Image (cartoon, grey):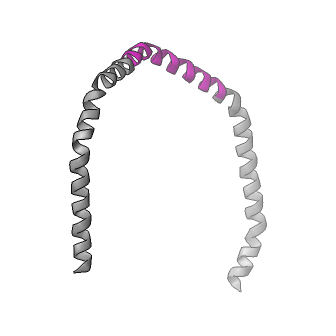
Amino acid sequence: EFLGQSVDNIYGYFQQAFQAITPISAQVLEASATQREKLTKDVEDLRKQIEPMREELRQVLLKHFEEYRQELKPFLDDYLVKQREHMEEIRTKLEPVIKSLEEK
């Protein structure tokens, strides 16, 4: 019963708070409407200015990524070969140990 009453009290507090806040928030929204509209328009204008440059930037970035990939590819291929050889060596060394452990 106490818990139910507490929940009801909390609900009542929230209802009162929302009733008190609603007129204030409406006034704030109304007062800031012109600033919000200007900000929205400015953001939209910036988006329109930047949009044509977006594809050009994308092409430049793709070109650079491809150049980096070409420069790094020999190194990475060599590294990969060495790592595979190393893993094969480890596998060869561990094979007798694993067999021995399985037999035990």
Q: Nearer the viewer, residue 15 or 54?
A: 15
Quadrant occupied by the N terminus: bottom left
Residue 68 in which image quadrant: top right
Q: Identify the residue at image location x=21%, y=68%.
A: 8
Q: Which quadrant of the figure has residue 79?
A: top right
**In the rendering, at what x and y percent does residue 40 appear?**
34, 23
Left or right: residue 3 compared with residue 74: left
Front residue of 34/50: it is 34
Q: Is residue 69 left or right of residue 86?
A: left
Q: Position of residue 41 (x, y in %)?
A: 33, 18
- Find residue 37 and report its image quarter: top left
Was residue 61 drawn as part of the magenta stretch in this picture? yes
Please name whichever residue, 23 or 53, is drawn nearer the observer in this view of the structure.
Answer: 23
Point out residue 87 in the picture as x, y percentages from the top left corner. Answer: 73, 57
Q: Residue at x 70, y 27 (%)?
A: 71
Segment colored magenta: 45-68
Is 51 above or below relative to 8? above
Residue at image coords 38%, 18% = 42
What percent of the width, then of the height, locates residue 83?
73, 50
Q: Main secondary structure of the magenta part?
A: helix
Quadrant in the picture for the C terminus? bottom right
Q: Residue at x 21, y 56 (%)?
A: 15
- Is the residue 58 above or below the residue 92 in the image? above
Toward the viewer: 75 or 7?
A: 7
